[in-house]
Image (cartoon, coloured by chain):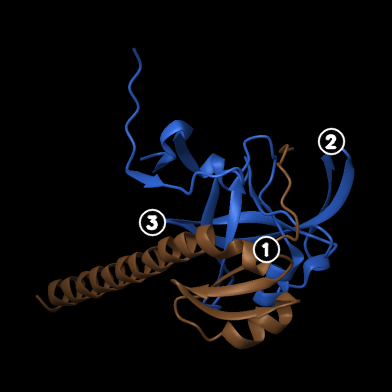
Amino acid sequence: MEILNFRSKHQYQASALGIELPITISVGAHVGISLLAKVDTGATFCIFQREYADALGIEVEGGLAKIVATPTGSFEAYGHTVKLSCFEYEFDSVVYFARHYEFHRNVLGLQGWLDKLRFGLVHHEASLFLSHYDD
Amino acid sequence: MRLSVNVHLAQGRKAVAALVQVHYRSERDGKHRQALRWLSENRNRYRGQWIALQGARLLATGKTAKEVYARVLDERPPALVVKIEAEELPFAGW
């Protein structure tokens, strides 16, 4: 039997909306913005609505351009280095903001979030377990 | 001796800064928990709108994020700003 230890346990709202977590994104001296994002182990990147980049004063198209595939097509997004904070964990990450305002998803994916943490999930109890990956 | 005092002072300042940060995050996370409870009970009333919450307090609503942020950008800790979709279909992930 394998045993995993985690630094913290959190309860999330169990609903059909997915595993939504409150996160805070900041850039430089900006105090930051808080939003809800879904944990998505199938997503390569962390991707957020463009409106949040606007609120942070980020020039979206000045970032690293990527085309992101979805089951129904693709969309453009731009990567920027931000400080990502979730519960007691905070780290610098490259996250992506959608080019178009019609993009209505906020997801925490593999690069920039799951690769920074150890992550345990018991969805039946709406419980989330977290540690820094090297903790 | 002087060097030792300076080192201790620097360590003290670092410890205080870390405690302030812990307190700030704790306050912010408490507000987020309250906001999530509020959302679970009230989100259906704000379909299609952007809303801003500080804990269980609704600060602003609007058709665009820009008009909502214009009213809440000075909030500390930052307000939780979300778009409540007009229709929330099950999400297939990517």
Q: Which residue is mark 1?
A: B84
Circle number at residue A71 = 2
Q: Which residue is mark 3?
A: A88
Question: Where is residue B3 shown, x and y percent of the image?
Answer: 17, 74
Q: Secondary structure at mark 2?
A: loop
| Residue depicted at x 82% and y 40% | A70
Relative height, residue A98 to residue B4 (above, below): above
Callout 3: 10 Å neighbours few (<14), some, many (20+)? some
Q: Chain of mark 2?
A: A
Question: Where is residue B34 shown, x and y percent of the image?
Answer: 41, 65
Display colour for chain A: blue
User: Do the residues at pointers 3 and 2 share their chain?
Assistant: yes
Q: Alpha carbon of mark 1 to alpha carbon of mark 3: how far?
A: 26 Å
In the rendered structure, are the residues bearing label 3 and label 2 in contact, judged by CB atoms less than 8 Å apart?
no
In the picture, the quarter occupied by the C terminus of chain B is top right
User: Amino acid type of disc 3?
Assistant: Glu
- Please tell me whether mark 1 or mark 3 is closer to you in this view: 1
Q: Secondary structure at mark 1?
A: loop
Q: Chain of mark 1?
A: B
Relative height, residue A100 to residue A73 (above, below): below
Display colour for chain B: brown
Of B42 and B90, which appears nearest the observer? B42
Question: Where is residue A49 shown, x and y percent of the image?
Answer: 73, 61
- Please tell me whether mark 3 or mark 2 is closer to you in this view: 2
Q: Is residue A47 rendered to the left or right of residue A69?
A: left
User: Amino acid type of disc 2?
Assistant: Pro
Q: Chain of mark 3?
A: A
- Please tell me whether mark 2 or mark 1 is closer to you in this view: 1
Q: Quadrant of residue B62?
A: bottom right
